[in-house]
Image (cartoon, rainbow, N blue to C red):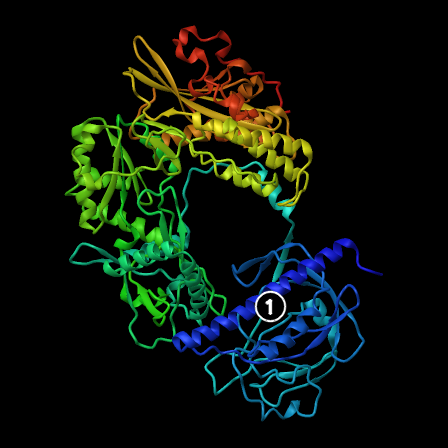
């Protein structure tokens, strides 16, 4: 029976993957040859060809299971022919979780292949199998080293399944217990002593089972495996993504996080210059062993060199950055000491046109695998997350009359690495292709290494604590929600306070070898007190007008207007699930100002997933039409301007007013700040958030309750962020659902778990919130729960200030706002 069209497509894909792999091996050989020529590196390719048994595919075609590495172009041709035999092995897509001993877990997304295995040179018996497709079955060869079997008398003159079992080789396939049980035959030849394994008879011949004691090797030659598989298809993963989710405002530290903190405290020290010296936090405090990481790093360097040769301007910029590293003592030639355990990091450049001072940045790839499929990042602890929440930073940034921003120059590179770890941060470089390739070591905390964010921020915290007696105000700023990575976003209420803070911050950081630069502010009098060379210059114009704008944490801030704005670029790409998600991700909206607009994208994506489309499938025409309309209106968001400063008017007290709403498709919450003075009341949008409803439909009252829970979590986040800065006189929560109001005024034990659990959380987290009823027409969260196209959104003034009644005294609010009497007979349906 000829293969179907879908099977033919799979065969074509398999052929493409095969050709890609062949080209990769050919490129590896070519690079290895260049490496030998340029750096006297001797590439080691060992010819090994081993046949174990035969596997038949779905079309009854047989293939020998082989293991082969190449050492010349002649053998490469043989390998090419062998690979062609495997084209018809049909792989079924599947995501599988593989569990091993202890907490070991890996995930395979390469799929499952079906086939029939038979003994070599035989047509029977036939065993039908389903095998997981993995990049590598075992991370090391089996056995781990060669051993001598000349004195094993009990296996002489018998038919072995593998006559070279004592030679260390890679593994092509592992058979599970169900197959192993079927291949066992009668007959066992016991070993003559306990240090030699027994011979067990199987369909494939005799196999050896047992421990081996080797006098010639320090390795333990006992290998055991235990695995369990969990299969999960892509649709289930996506469904879980859109399921109801809990918002957790708490941060938990794992045992690894605690160890990483203790390790930093014990190993970090300070030089006489004030700079800090840190150590790499390896897992289990065990120094890893890397094998042949130089070859992939060298291959990628030579590839980079070719790209730089094509672009001379980029080559000059790249070389200048490397020279700056060398001039500042951050990079130096590696010494000639021979160390078999070293790690080479590939590097490349990324271009950021939005960067004011560094449009070209060198990125180091510490995730590059060595020949044992281990990378530096695999062996390092990331440490606890010390980065402050961006939303909290921006909320604080809105409190000050005088806004201040600054940047810590090359923060990572001001922190030195303990010299004993230099060997794990080696790179290849040469300024001219006429020169030999040289080895360098990176002497500082390096961008691209897993532990670097923790080490950098932990060092800033350490510096703030060490110098807090001399610079108390600056120390408090660095330890609070005013810094994200290397950006400081803070402020003051007078020019004198701002000047004093600038002095303290600059001198405190200078004590640790850090320099503050790119100062910016909405107050010109403050900027005049700062040396001109430290001010932000040549601002990038991200908008259509001529105003100078500064990109703050992905959100633009215009110091002249003192307002936030957005930069949106609509690409002419095909409407697919992948492209829609990319479009959504490019609208970075940490405070939820654009929630009604971003919800439309979420709903479109959910619609695509409910249709069970693949990532790159073209959706139905009605979805394409809606998506194209959405994309065409995205540039309208460039008109949005949001005042940064919340307290432009004097006030007597402050209140928080939150609204929540739910629909069949989504639910949302938004919070407004209400400033009340004797003659004036003003309101401003503080933050908002939306979530799509789960794919499994639930009743509208339950969705409304989810919205109330979302609002509660938003309230908690705002109150936590402002806990030491603002006292709110009252907190009001508004919903247009009378059922939800009745639930919230009742005891949770009366309801089913879904409702009871959420009522309990709301009542426990914020017992002082005044929950009130509001009509649907006055519910500010309504557009955020239904979605608005960009052109309508920019005209929606009520979204930014809330309903009109908020600007009136409470005595003039509509009567239906006040609590209703609970209906004790109301159930949760």
Q: Is residue 98 above or below residue 82?
A: above
| Res 518 quadrant in image | top left
Compared across the picture, whether 308 is left or right of 213 comes to left
Question: The C terminus lies in which quarter of the figure?
Answer: top right
- Which residue lies most toward the right here? 1
Q: Is residue 696 above or below residue 93?
A: above
SS assignment at label 1: helix
| Res 336 quadrant in image | bottom left
Q: Is residue 759 visible?
A: no
Which residue is more in the foreground, 601 or 171?
601
**Residue 106 appears at what percent x and percent y?**
55, 58
**Residue 314 appears at what percent x and percent y?**
37, 54
For image coordinates 33% across by 23% down, the residue present is: 646
For image coordinates 70% across by 65% down, the residue present is: 87
Question: The N terminus lies in which quarter of the figure?
Answer: bottom right
**Residue 134 appears at what percent x and percent y?**
60, 63
Q: Is residue 137 above or below residue 791?
A: below
Which residue matches tag 1?
Answer: 22
**Residue 546 appears at what percent x and percent y?**
35, 29
Q: Is residue 817 visible?
A: yes
Compared across the picture, whether 86 is left or right of 411 comes to right
How many marks on residues? 1
Which residue is more in the foreground, 493 or 43?
43
| Res 703 quadrant in image | top right
For image coordinates 43% across by 22% down, the residue present is: 769
Which residue is more in the foreground, 658 or 634?
634
């Amino acid at each position: 029976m000829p293969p179907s069209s879908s099977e033919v497509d799979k065969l074509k894909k398999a052929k493409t993957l095969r050709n890609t792999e062949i080209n990769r091996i050919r490129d590896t050989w070519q690079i290895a040859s260049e490496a030998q020529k340029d750096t006297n590196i001797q590439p080691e390719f060992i010819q090994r060809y081993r046949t174990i048994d035969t596997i038949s595919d779905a079309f009854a075609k047989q293939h020998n299971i082989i293991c082969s590495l190449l050492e010349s172009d002649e053998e490469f041709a043989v390998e090419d022919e062998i690979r062609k035999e495997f084209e018809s092995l049909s792989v079924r897509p599947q995501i599988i979780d593989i569990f091993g001993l202890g907490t070991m877990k890996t995930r395979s997304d390469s799929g499952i292949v079906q086939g029939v295995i038979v003994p070599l040179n035989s047509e029977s018996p036939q065993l039908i199998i389903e095998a997981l497709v993995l990049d590598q079955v075992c991370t090391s060869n089996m056995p781990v080293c060669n051993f001598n079997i000349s004195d094993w008398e009990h296996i002489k003159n018998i038919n072995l399944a593998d006559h070279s079992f004592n030679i260390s080789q890679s593994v092509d396939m592992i058979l599970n217990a169900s197959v192993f049980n079927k291949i066992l035959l009668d007959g066992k030849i016991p070993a003559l002593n306990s240090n030699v394994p027994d011979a067990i008879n199987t369909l494939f011949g005799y196999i050896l089972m047992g421990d081996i004691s080797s006098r010639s090797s320090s390795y333990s030659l006992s290998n055991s495996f235990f695995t369990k598989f969990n299969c999960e298809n892509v649709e289930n993963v996506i469904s879980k993504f859109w399921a109801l989710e809990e918002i957790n405002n708490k941060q938990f530290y794992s045992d690894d996080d605690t160890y990483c903190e203790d390790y930093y405290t014990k190993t970090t020290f300070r030089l006489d210059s004030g700079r800090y010296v840190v150590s790499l936090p390896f897992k289990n405090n065990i120094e890893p062993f890397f094998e042949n990481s130089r070859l992939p790093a060298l291959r990628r360097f030579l590839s980079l060199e070719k790209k730089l040769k094509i672009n001379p301007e980029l080559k000059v910029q790249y070389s200048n950055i490397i020279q700056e590293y060398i001039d500042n003592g951050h990079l130096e030639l590696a010494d000639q000491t021979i160390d078999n355990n070293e790690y080479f990091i590939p590097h490349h450049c990324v271009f950021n046109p939005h960067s004011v001072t560094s449009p070209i940045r060198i990125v180091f790839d510490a995730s590059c695998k060595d020949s044992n499929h281990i990378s530096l990042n695999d062996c390092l602890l990331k440490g606890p997350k010390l980065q402050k929440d961006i939303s909290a930073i921006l909320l604080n940034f809105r409190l000050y009359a005088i806004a201040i921003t600054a940047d810590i120059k090359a923060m990572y590179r001001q922190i030195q690495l303990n010299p004993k770890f230099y060997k794990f941060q080696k790179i290849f470089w040469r300024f001219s292709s006429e020169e030999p390739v040289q080895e360098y070591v990176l002497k500082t905390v390096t961008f691209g290494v897993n532990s670097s964010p923790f080490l950098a921020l932990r060092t800033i915290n350490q510096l703030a604590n060490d110098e807090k007696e001399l610079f108390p105000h600056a120390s408090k700023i660095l330890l609070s929600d005013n810094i994200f990575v290397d950006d400081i976003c803070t402020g003051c209420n007078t020019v004198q306070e701002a000047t004093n803070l600038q002095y303290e911050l600059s001198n405190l950081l200078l004590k640790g070898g850090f320099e503050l630069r790119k100062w910016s502010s909405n107050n010109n009098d403050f900027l005049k007190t700062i040396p001109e060379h430290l001010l932000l210059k040549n601002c990038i114009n991200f908008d259509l007008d001529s105003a100078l704008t500064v990109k703050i944490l992905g959100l633009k801030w215009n110091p002249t207007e003192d307002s936030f704005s957005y930069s949106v670029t609509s690409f002419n790409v095909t409407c697919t699930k992948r492209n829609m998600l990319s479009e959504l991700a490019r609208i970075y909206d940490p405070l939820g100002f654009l929630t009604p607009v971003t919800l439309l994208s979420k709903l479109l994506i959910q619609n695509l997933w409910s249709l069970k489309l693949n990532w790159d499938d073209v959706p139905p025409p009605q979805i394409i039409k809606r998506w194209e309309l959405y994309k065409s209106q995205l540039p309208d968001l460039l008109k949005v301007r949001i005042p940064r400063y919340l307290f432009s008017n004097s006030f007597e007290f402050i209140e928080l007013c939150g609204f929540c709403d739910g629909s069949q498709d989504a639910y949302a919450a938004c919070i407004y700040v209400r400033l009340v003075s004797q003659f004036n009341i003003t309101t401003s949008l503080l933050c908002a958030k939306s979530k799509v409803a789960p794919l499994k439909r639930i009743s509208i009252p339950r969705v409304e309750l989810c919205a109330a829970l979302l609002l509660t979590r938003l309230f908690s986040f705002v109150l936590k962020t402002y806990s030491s800065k603002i006292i709110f006189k009252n907190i009001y929560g508004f919903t247009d659902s009378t059922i939800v109001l009745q639930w919230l005024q009742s005891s949770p034990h009366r309801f089913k778990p879904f409702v009871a659990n959420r009522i309990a959380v709301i009542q426990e987290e914020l017992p002082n919130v005044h929950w009130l009823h509001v009509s649907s027409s006055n519910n500010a969260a309504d557009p955020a729960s239904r979605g608005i196209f960009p052109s309508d959104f920019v005209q929606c003034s009520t979204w930014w200030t809330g309903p009109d009644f908020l600007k009136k005294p409470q005595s003039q609010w509509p009567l239906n706002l006040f609590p209703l009497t609970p209906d004790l007979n109301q159930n949760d349906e």
